[in-house]
Amino acid sequence: MESTGAKAPAGHGLAGSSDSRIGPGTAPEPSQPRTYHQPGVLRVLQSREEVKHFYDKIAKAYDLLAEHSEGPVRQAGLEMLNARPGEHVLEIGFGTGHCLSELARSVGPSGKVLGIDLSEKMGEVSAERLRRENLEDRVELACGDALHLPYVSQTLDVVFMSFTLELFDTPEIPLVLDECRRVLKTAGRIVVIGMSRAQPDSLMTEVFEWTHRHFPNYLDCRPILVRQALEDAGFQIGDAKTMKMWIQVEIVCGMKPSKNG
């Protein structure tokens, strides 16, 4: 599970792009809260500060905890995304940086990868990975909240999220996706990987949700309806699939339509 946004500490190739068209810029006024409901989906109970503290604490051990199960699913999402040379890509909730590296290789020296994560420690782990792989020149990391993306509108080709959207409380989900729509160019695409509640009667879903209700400090996320969230946010669905981790996962690709589309 990646943390919900990301500020990377100074000295790790963080915010401060020399190209204001693609790098951090002045964020617009935050969207106004609105009522949003997904049938059967539980609420998130932890505060942002609690989430940040949790991921800062487990950053160095995260791969030992999750890489075996999450890695194949993330790879399927990257294949669906199909980042191309020269594209400008944003990953929200980049965690320990595996996908940042893959994306940087895909876009090549003519492209750019931006990453945002709530956890400073995740930013440090990712920055070290990028240095080891000699990819730091293609990636700019920032520490921040995906509810207020610090990027210029309509400048990105791609947004990627892996096990991140389900960390946001239900009323926040459309606000995060509104921000994704804002920074994407027309016809830009978004791929979201998330734990799915599309089959709510499965035993693992029931166990997971019971644990989330009773021990929210240890399980800070819950299954959501990924495809529905993207459709509700106005994205046109281009591809979608489900995979089995230890729980069902949705991988959904959407496109930002034209104003007349």
Image: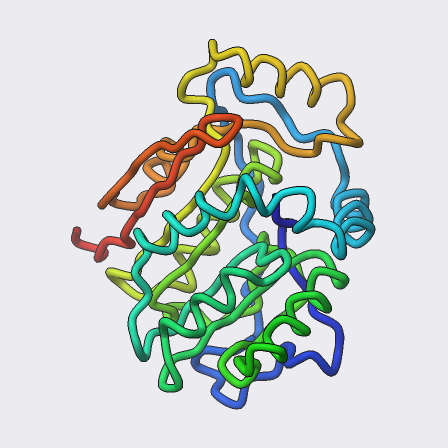
- In the figure, is residue 122 to the left or right of 155? right
Q: Is residue 137 above or below residue 106?
A: below
Choose between 68 and 6: the one closer to the eye.
Answer: 68
Quarter of the figure with the N terminus: top right
In this rendering, the answer to whether 92 lies above or below 209 is below
Return the residue found at the far bottom. 18
Residue at 55%, 66% in the rendered image = 115
In the rendering, at what x and y percent does residue 102 appear?
Answer: 45, 66
In the rendered picture of this protein, how many numbered marks are placed on residues? 0
Q: Image height check: is 177 above or below 197?
A: below
Q: How is the image coloured?
A: rainbow
Q: Is residue 139 left or right of residue 186?
A: right
Between residue 157 and residue 131, name the one nearer to us.
Answer: 131
Residue 55: % across, % down = 75, 49
Q: Position of residue 195 (x, y in %)?
A: 50, 32
> Which quadrant of the structure image shows residue 108?
bottom left
- The image quarter containing residue 97 is bottom right
Along the line of sight, the residue nearer the viewer: 45 or 196: 196
In the foreground, 211 or 17: 211
Which residue lies at the image location 29% right of the left edge and 70% below the top edge? 84
Using the rendered view, name the quadrant where residue 105 is placed. bottom left
At 54% from the left edge and 50% from the top edge, which residue is drawn?
31
